[in-house]
Amino acid sequence: MTDTQDGPELHPTTRELAGGPNFAAISTLLASGRIQTQYIWVGVADTPAGERLYVNTEVHRQKFRDLERDARVTVAIRDEQNPYRYAEVRGRVADVERGQAARDRIDELSQKYNGRPYPPDQIKTERVTVFIEPERQTIAG
């Protein structure tokens, strides 16, 4: 099955995959125009603007610096039980969350992926949550 959906509403498969312990690849644009891709944890949250995908990182990391400069982003979420099934989300940063709320979200993600809170000694700077508004979603599998 292949499906596409335009607009900010999350496709049901995107929501399902982001809600489970499935890894995502996030692609951002470096200042040089080259694309950078990294594997990352992903979640889905209710926001005042509706359901949004989110990722959590630190302010010193390249992906966050890229997104501050250019809000365009692609996130591909792979079904860990069936790698031929995935959701690709092309969109933009809709909002950034800082402070304790961002710290709490990394603990939520760590619980989902590792079954325990995020180790405080792994935090080098400030945690931030990046909320992504989809523009186009492609579903496969």
Image (tube, grey):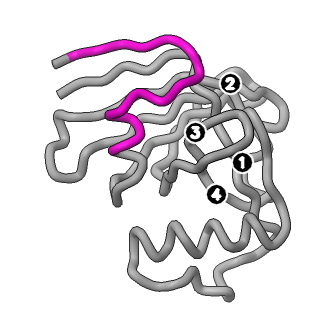
Occupied quadrant, residue 139: top left
Residues packed near mark 3 inside 10 Å, few (<14), some (14 to 19) or many (20 plus): some
Disc with the residue nearer the chain's start (1 vs 3): 3
Q: Nearer the viewer, residue 49 or 24?
A: 49
Residues packed near mark 2 inside 10 Å, few (<14), some (14 to 19) or many (20 plus): some
Q: Which mark is residue 56?
A: 4
Disc with the residue nearer the chain's start (2 vs 1): 1
Classify mark 2: helix, strand or loop: strand
Vertically, is 88 above or below 43?
A: above
**Distance between mark 1 and mark 3 Cα atoms:** 26 Å
Magenta span: 2-16
| Amino acid found under the numbered disc labelled 2 | Arg
Disc with the residue nearer the chain's start (3 vs 4): 3
Q: Position of residue 13 (x, y in %)?
A: 32, 34
**Distance between mark 2 and mark 4 Cα atoms:** 16 Å
Image quadrant holding the N terminus, namely top left
Disc with the residue nearer the chain's start (1 vs 4): 4
Q: Which mark is residue 72?
A: 2
**Distance between mark 3 and mark 4 Cα atoms:** 16 Å
- Residue at which label 3 appears: 51
Nearest to the eye among marks 3 and 4: give it. 3
- Residue at which label 1 appears: 62
| Amino acid found under the numbered disc labelled 4 | Asn
| Amino acid found under the numbered disc labelled 3 | Glu
